[in-house]
Amino acid sequence: MFCCIFCQPGGWQLSKERKQPTFFVVVLTDIDSERHYCSCLTFYEAEINLQGTKETEEEESGLIAPAEVFAPKSLVLVSRLDYPEIFRACLGLIYTVYVDSLNVSLEALIANLCSCLVPASGGSQKLFSLGAGDRQLIQTPLHDSLPVTGTSVALLFQQLGIQNVLSLFCAVLTENKVLFHSASFQRLSDACRALESLMFPLKYSYPYIPILPAQLLEVLSSPTPFIIGVHSVFRNDIHELLDVIIADLDGGTIKIPECIHLSQLPEPLLHQTQMALSLVLHPDLETADYAFPPPRTALSHTKMLDKEVRAIFLRLFAQLFQGYRSCLQLIRIHAEPVIHFHKAAFLGQRGLIENDFLTKVLNGMAFAGFVSERGPPFRACDLFDELVAFEVERIKADEGNPPKMIKHVRELAEQLFKNENPNPHIAFQKVPRPTEGSHLRVHILPFPRINECRVQELLQEGLARSQGAPPATRGDKKCVVPAGPPVVSIMEKGSTVFNSAQRLEVVRNCISFIFENKFLETEKTLPAALRALKGKAARHCLTQELGLHVKQNRAILDHQQFDYIVRMMNCALQDCSSSEEYSVAAALLPLTTAFYRKLAPGVSQFAYTCVQDHPIWTNQQFWETTFYSNVQNQVRSLYLTAKEDNHAVQPRQKVGERIKY
C-alpha cells in the first residue's frame, strides 16, 4: 500500500498526453530505523477502452483508433542498498526490452537482477549483466561511513546559494523542521541527500522523507524535526506552516518563519566557512576588482566541486569538535561499553558557554549518536578521525592564507573523490536505451504480467550457480582511535592575566600562610588571592593545595583558619554555574566534608555547612557528571596499573587496547 502511494506522490492520474518515462528514488524508513531505497521508473500506457460508444464502430471497421487517454504504470525496485544510477540503468533496461519488443525474457532479467551479488565495501568492483546485451559495473566506496553524494551537494549550492544553504545547515543541526519543494522529484531527493551529507560526521536521526506523497501531507504538522520534500504543486498548502523552514529549490529562496530563532555558527568559524565557500564556488571573486585580472580561473568539474564543498564542512566539524575525545567518560564496560560526553567541560574549555548554536548541537540526538558510534577508543577509523586528530593545527594556520586553505581543501576533496571512485580505470559499460521516440508510438501492447513462478525458478538456478563463489566479506580494520590535541578555545580571550604563574603563586602562598598560622601575612595576601580565584587555573590550584593538607579524610582547623578556608571556597564556587565545567566544584566537594572545626565538646562544624547555598549543588547535571567521572576513575584503577596510569599519554586508548571491546 505504502509503495503504491510513494511511487506516484502526486496521486494516480490519467493523462491526455504521451509523457516521457520518469525516474526518481523514494526513501522509506522502517520501524528499526533501516532505510529502504525505492527506485521508481514510471511510463504511460494507452487506455484504448475508454472511448465509450466508439468501441462498436472500431470493431466493425477492424481499426483501432489512437488512444486519447494514458495511464501511469510504475516499475519499482526496493533495496537496502543505495545505488541509484545502477537501479536507474536496470529499470531502464527492463523498460527498453518491453517497449522495443526485444527477444529477451522479462522474467530472466528480473531473476538475474535479484540474484546479483553485491561486492563488499572497500572499493570492490563487480561487472554484471542482466542478459539483454548490457554490461554494467557496481563500484563500492572505500569507506561505508563516508556519504556518497555524486554531484548533489554542488547542485544544492547552485540552486540556493551559500547563505541559504548555511542557514539550512544550521537549521538541521539545531533540530528545526526543513521542507524542500520543487517541480522535480529527483531534485528533491538530491537536495535532501546533500543536506544530510553536509552533517557528516553526524547522522540525521529524525524523519527523513525526500518525497512526501499528497496523501500524507498531514505529516508536515508533526511536532518532531524533519527533512522532507514535496512537489511544488502543493506549495499553496505548505505556506500556512508556521514552524517550518521552507526552501524553494526552483526559485532559489528560503523562508524562515518569524517564530523561529535560527542559531548561527560561532565566529570566527562562520566567517571562515563563508569565505572558503566563496573561494571554491566563485574563484574569480577575489580578483574581480583587479585592474589587470589574471586569466579566468576555471571551476573544478562538478563531481570534484561537490567534494571541495564537502571538504570545507569537514574542516568546520574538525574545528568544532576538536578535542572531543578528552571529554569522553567511560562509565560502563560490560556487557557493552557506555560512554558519556562531558558537555559542560567541552563548552567551558572552548569558551562557548553562552553560544546557543553549539549548545543545541551537543544536546541534540545527532550528537548523542555521534558519541555512541565514535566514542569507543578501539574501532574502524575514517577521514574525519584523522582530520580532527592531526590536521586542526594546520587548519588554524591556514586561516589568513587563502592559497594554503584551498590547497588543503583540494587534498581533502581528492580523498573524498577517491572514496567514491577508487579505481581510476573504470571498465567499459553498456546499457541499451529505448529507441528514440518509442514512448510516442501509437500502438504499444500493455506491459505483460510477470510469471512469478518462472522468476522464482530462474532465481533459484542463479543462486545455485553462485554458491561456489567466495563470500563478499570485508573485515573492518580496527585500531586505537587517535585522541588528537586537547580541547582549546575557539574564542580569542582578551586577557590571560589570571592564569599567570604569578597569580597561582599568590594562591599557594596564601594557603601556606593560613596553615602556618601566619595570620598577618594571610591578611596581606588574601585580597590578591581572592582576585586570582576569578581565573579557572587558580581555582584548580586552590583545590590541589587544599588536598595536600587533608590526612585520612579529615583536617581539623582552628576558628581563624576555618574562616579563611571557607571564604576562599565560597569565592571559588561563586563562579560555578549550570554551564561551568563542574571540575572545580567536583574537586571541592570532598574537601568540604574534610575540613572542620570544633565548636564545643562533641560538636563539630564542617565546611559544607558554610558553602551549601551555592546553586551548583542544586544542579542535577553536576551530580550526574561528577558520578560519571568517579565511575571512570574506578574503571581506570581496575584496568590500569599505577605505572601505566601515571605515564600513559592516552589512558582511554590504553583501556580500549587492553579490553578490546
Image: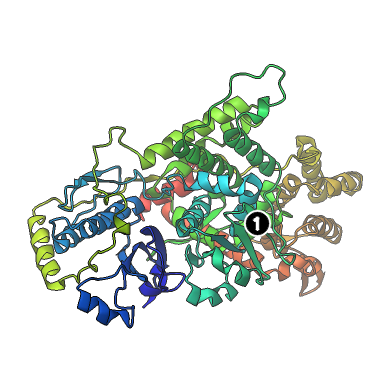
Q: Is residue 538 above or below residue 597?
A: above
- Judging from the image, the colouring scheme is rainbow
Pick the front one: 601 or 481: 481
Horizontal side, residue 654 vs residue 264: left or right:
left
Q: Please name whichever residue, 621 or 551, is drawn nearer the observer in this view of the structure.
A: 621
Q: Residue at x 55, y 66 (%)?
A: 233
Which SS class for mark 1? strand
Residue identifier under label 1: 254
Identify whether 530 is placed above or below 66: above
How many numbered discs, if any?
1
Q: Which residue is found at the position 49% from the left and 58% from the top?
A: 184
Residue drawn at (57%, 59%) of the image: 629
198, 54: nearer the viewer: 54
**Residue drawn at (21%, 56%), measured in percent from left and top?**
100
Is residue 449 at all visible to an observer of this figure? yes
- Mark 1 nearby-residue class (10 Å; few <14, some 14–19, many ≥20): many
Q: Residue furthest top?
A: 292
Q: Position of residue 255 (x, y in %)?
A: 67, 60
Location of residue 656 with respect to 410 vertically, above or below: below
On the rendered image, what quadrant is the N terminus found in?
Answer: bottom left
- Residue 61 lies left or right of residue 27; in this view the side is left
Residue 427 locus on image (x, y percent): 24, 37
Q: Nearer the viewer, residue 17 or 585?
A: 17
Where does the image place residue 225, in percent across and percent down from the top left? 58, 67
Kindly indicate the quadrant of the structure image that contains residue 493. top right
Which quarter of the picture shows residue 74?
bottom left
Quadrant of the image containing the C terminus: bottom left
Question: Could you tell me residue 618's position as x and y percent?
Answer: 72, 71
At label 1, which amino acid type do we have?
Answer: Ile
Q: Is residue 389 left or right of residue 262?
A: left
Q: Is residue 587 visible?
A: no
